[in-house]
Image: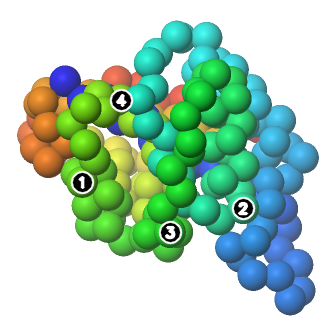
């Protein structure tokens, strides 16, 4: 069994002139929401073998907040492909994960995460900022994940 937790970065700062989208930080509300969601998630005591995140400022910070709440003592893997990714690039990132990893937390952006959720479990909503989705895959290798062996376990988001 493989377990994927998909996290969309929390609320970001408003766009500023001359600021690249990649560098937009979490807003104060976003930090509060990420901290709240990470504490709720950590309270479930679920093992996380790997955290992978886009290196954009807001996703990196969201991943760091989750890592701290989870007492994750490994390095958060930053993957440039996750910023502005197409769904096939997300799937490739996931399927190339070593099989010694049984549970992965993936922190990314929309519209990619909505497309991934639609592809894997037929999700019919927009993936909200700060949301967490849990998907179980009935297989022993990440390369074998697909919609046929995927099961949506939960989808939670901050009450803004």
Percent of width and height locating residue 24: 78, 67
Please report the residue visible at 65 percent of the width from the left and 65 percent of the height from the top: 56
The span from disc 2 to disc 3 (Cα, nearest Å) is 12 Å
Q: Is residue 85 above or below residue 52?
A: below
Please indicate whether residue 153 sits to the left or right of residue 138 in the image.
Answer: right
The span from disc 3 to disc 4 (Cα, nearest Å) is 21 Å
- Determine the secondary structure under disc 2: helix
Q: Nearer the viewer, mark 1 or mark 2?
A: 1
Name the residue beneath numbered marker 4. Answer: 103
The span from disc 3 to disc 1 (Cα, nearest Å) is 15 Å
The span from disc 1 to disc 4 (Cα, nearest Å) is 14 Å
Percent of width and height locating residue 18: 86, 89
Percent of width and height locating residue 120: 25, 47
Name the residue beneath numbered marker 3. Answer: 80
Please report the residue visible at 64 percent of the width from the left and 54 percent of the height from the top: 59
Asked whether 31 or 151 is in front, the reply is 31
Please report the residue visible at 61 percent of the width from the left and 11 percent of the height from the top: 43
Name the residue beneath numbered marker 2. Answer: 57
* Mark 3 or mark 1: whose residue is earlier in sequence: 3
The span from disc 2 to disc 4 (Cα, nearest Å) is 24 Å
């Amino acid at each position: 069994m493989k377990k994927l937790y998909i996290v969309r970065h929390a609320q970001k700062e408003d766009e500023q002139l001359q600021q690249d989208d990649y560098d937009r930080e979490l807003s104060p509300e976003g930090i509060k929401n990420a901290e709240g969601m990470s504490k709720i998630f950590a309270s479930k005591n679920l093992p996380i073998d790997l955290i992978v995140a886009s290196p954009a400022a807001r996703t990196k910070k969201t991943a760091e907040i989750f890592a701290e709440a989870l007492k994750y003592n490994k390095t958060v893997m930053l993957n440039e492909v996750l910023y502005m990714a197409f769904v096939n690039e997300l799937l490739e990132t996931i399927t190339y994960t070593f099989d010694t990893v049984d549970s992965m937390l993936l922190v990314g952006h929309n519209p990619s995460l909505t497309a991934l959720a639609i592809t894997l479990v037929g999700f019919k909503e927009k993936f909200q900022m700060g949301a967490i989705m849990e998907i179980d895959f009935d297989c022993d290798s990440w390369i074998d994940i697909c919609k046929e062996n995927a099961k949506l376990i939960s989808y939670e988001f901050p009450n803004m």
